[in-house]
């Protein structure tokens, strides 16, 4: 598959992109622009950077938001179960849980069914922050997906869901 990355300028007609050159700092070699995995990683990095920036006023990260979102659907949950749902490792979920607890957004208590584990529950303050974050992230996603029309956005989400849930 041959893929070239183009940029368009205001002087050119729509649909007639200007080829990028090696002198352009935004040039991406075909060996990278033609790789789906690389392009997905670049897109994810851009989306994450926008999300992190937009969440700064709330004092939480995108990963912390993901924990709050999971707990909004079902709470309490063990840290192990949250990690499984989000695809995170044990160390990461422990750090996220501790951080969210320090901020008063979750409570962690010993699990009644397994005294070695913690059950994590969303606090009312955590629900308030989650709702604010949801709105901020919806705006962030809208800006990120500006190049795509509504139907294309739905299609992209559908295609990514197929890959994620293999």
Image: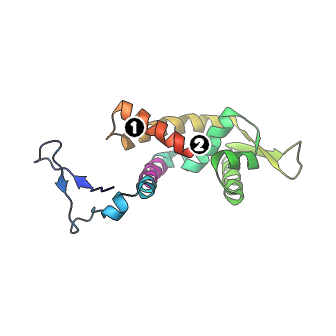
Residue 23 at x, y percent in the picture: 21, 69
Q: Which residue is mark 1?
A: 142
Prevailing secondary structure class for the magenta stretch in the rendered image: helix
Contact flag, marks 1 and 2 (Cβ < 8 Å): no
Q: Residues within 10 Å of mark 2 (few under 14, many from 20)?
A: few
Q: Is residue 95 above or below residue 151?
A: below
Single out the residue that lies furthest toward the bottom: 23
Task: Report whether residue 47 is seen.
Answer: yes
What residue appears at the point 20 percent right and 64 percent down from the top-left corner? 21
- As drawn, the label of residue 85 is none
Residue 130 at x, y percent in the picture: 59, 37
Q: Is residue 152 magenta?
A: no
Q: Which residue is mark 2?
A: 165
Q: Nearer the viewer, residue 73 or 32?
A: 32
**Residue 125 appears left or right of 47:** right
Range of the magenta residues?
43-53
Single out the residue that lies furthest toward the left: 11
Q: Is residue 68 above or below residue 17?
A: above
Q: Quadrant of residue 125?
A: top right
Q: Residues within 10 Å of mark 1 (few under 14, many from 20)?
A: few
Residue 38 at x, y percent in the picture: 43, 58
Q: Quadrant of the C terminus?
A: top right
**Residue 36 appears left or right of 100:** left
Q: Quadrant of residue 33?
A: bottom left
What residue appears at the point 46 percent right and 36 percent down from the top-left corner? 138
Which is nearer the N-term, disc 1 or disc 2?
Answer: 1
Task: Report whether residue 60 is seen.
Answer: no
Single out the residue that lies furthest toward the top: 151
């Amino acid at each position: 598959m041959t893929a070239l990355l183009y940029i368009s300028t205001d002087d050119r007609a729509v649909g007639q992109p200007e080829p990028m050159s090696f002198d352009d700092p935004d040039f991406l070699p075909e060996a990278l622009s033609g790789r789906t995995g690389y392009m997905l990683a670049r897109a994810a990095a851009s989306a994450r950077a926008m999300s992190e920036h937009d969440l700064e006023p709330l004092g939480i990260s995108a990963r912390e938001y993901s924990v709050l979102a999971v707990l909004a659907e079902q709470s309490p949950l063990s840290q192990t179960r949250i990690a499984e749902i989000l695809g995170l490792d044990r160390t990461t979920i422990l750090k996220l849980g501790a951080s969210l607890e320090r901020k008063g957004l979750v409570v962690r208590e010993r699990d009644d069914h397994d005294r070695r584990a913690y059950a994590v529950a969303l606090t009312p303050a955590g629900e308030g922050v989650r709702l604010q974050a949801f709105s901020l992230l919806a705006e962030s996603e809208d800006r990120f997906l500006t190049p795509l029309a509504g139907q294309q956005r739905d299609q992209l989400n559908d295609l990514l869901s197929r890959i994620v849930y293999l």
